[in-house]
Amino acid sequence: MAETAPELVLKSARGRWVVVATILGSGMASLDATVVNIALPRIGADLGGGLTSLQWTVNAYTLTLAAFLLLGGSLGDRLGRRRIFVVGVVWFAVASLACAVAPTSGILILARAFQGVGGALLTPGSLAILEASFRQQDRAAAIGAWSGFAGITTAIGPFVGGWLIQSVSWRLIFVINVPLAAVVIWVTIRHVPETRDPDAPSRFDLAGTGLAAAGLTGIVYALTEGPARGWTDLAVVASGVVGILAIAGFFAVEAGNDHPILPLGIFRSSQFSAANAVTFVVYGALGGSLFLLPIQLQRVLHYSPTAAGSSLLPITVVMLVLSARMGRLATRTGPRIPMTVGPLLAGVGLLLLSRAGAGSSYVADILPAVTVFALGLSATVAPLTATVLAAAPAEHAGVASAVNNDVARTAQLIAVAVLPVAAGITSASYSNVTDFSAGFEHAMWIAAAGLAAGGVLAFATIRRPLVETKPSSMISCGVDAPPRGPVSVHASA
């Protein structure tokens, strides 16, 4: 039994409201993702807890988002995309309010983990609703409108968030989600049609989801707490062992599951596996460096939150202008060259950023570095995602996009935990501006080496030319995640 053909027309009043609902819903999550890093120094000063608490403030959200993202897509396909989208928005708003009133860093971290679950429920729903609701001839235009406004949200997010943090409090970046969520819920219930996939599996892969969450949690906990507690601490060792066993169990369960949340057969494509390996290396370097950069700007260069957010605006602007063009270029020439040159160029940008210390000038030191960094990202991101989608079978296109997104999130999780340690940034050095700045310089060199490794890996493994993709397959988003591909899919297909 096939899903009823969508009939919604973009130029109708209802069609426009559907686009508004998905833009505001996904915009909530993307705004939060871009702003929290800017708020970290103020959160640390207000709640204490040191570097480890700041790492968990970022990673608690990313951890649950990555662990439950595929399940969120499956729930929408089976139970109704509008229903799960609304549940996700409500969940995200409640968690945001908990973040806003958190009296301690521990409660904030728990609230952020709760918030990540909401993000995992609403994020797949945004594009899935558009894909399933609009008629074929209007689908690309609807998704294009969503993409354009999502790009604007990503661009203005750091500036607006920085202004809120500086003028009022870091808590306001979470409070603002509540009225936004109320609008999204009202519009969605009133205007968005319910869609589901009658052919979706009746059973959810709860065992696979649980093992993936337990594995990621155990490994990330060990990597994050190891430097402070000691690598021989019983809790650190136990969590690491449990995490590794859980990940091994996850792959065993998926291999024997008739309807796995992650169909392992998709990795039989060497091109798909290679592109995801490049994703892991490149996005790990990006996640670690973008975690430390706002802290360096505010604590060492004494930027205000507004100035710190604004200083990174060229990254988003350059990517918005060039990403689609780079995607088309990769379609004509093949992805190997842009995926090789892009990470190398981004690595040069991080090397230039390593010079950003006390007394640095924005125009002479920061701006050229972030511009070169952005040019490298623009050459990398769209061809990388297009390669993933082109390498996967058509029936697994949505799963391929979701897997690539999860690979990027997992890489960022690990990098935020590991890069400060590798660069010699400890809780003690975090409190000392001079020591932190020295560690930041080392971290940028390490991250630049990671990007260079990603470029070399792409040159060695990426071969197949790209196939021309539909407009809906090339949608750019912020640098915290890969561009989103077609999402009207069965995450457990």
Image (cartoon, helix red, strand yellow):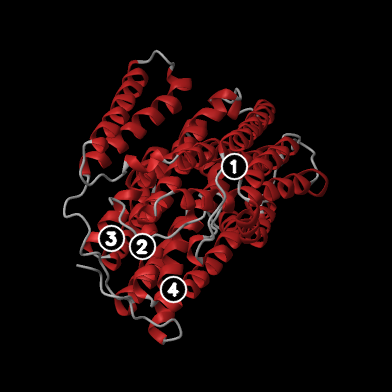
Which dot marks residue 476? none
Q: Nearer the viewer, residue 83 or 253?
A: 253
Q: Residues within 10 Å of mark 1 (few under 14, many from 20)?
A: some
Q: CA distance from mark 1 to mark 2?
A: 30 Å
The reply to whether residue 402 is visible in this rendering is yes
- Disc 1 marks a residue whose amino acid type is Leu
Whichever of callouts 1 and 4 sits on the residue coming sooner in the sequence is 4
> Which numbered circle lies on residue 290?
1
Q: Position of residue 292 (x, y in %)?
A: 60, 37
- Which residue corresponds to mark 3? 76
Amino acid type, residue under disc 2 in the picture: Ser
Secondary element at tag 1:
helix
Disc 1 to disc 3: CB gap under 8 Å = no
Residue 104 visible in rendering = no
Please tell me how crowded label 3 is: few (under 14), some (14-19), or many (20+) other residues with Cα within 10 Å. Answer: many
Q: CA distance from mark 1 to mark 4?
A: 34 Å
- Structural distance between the alpha carbons of marks 1 and 3: 32 Å
N-terminal of the two: label 1 or label 3? Answer: 3
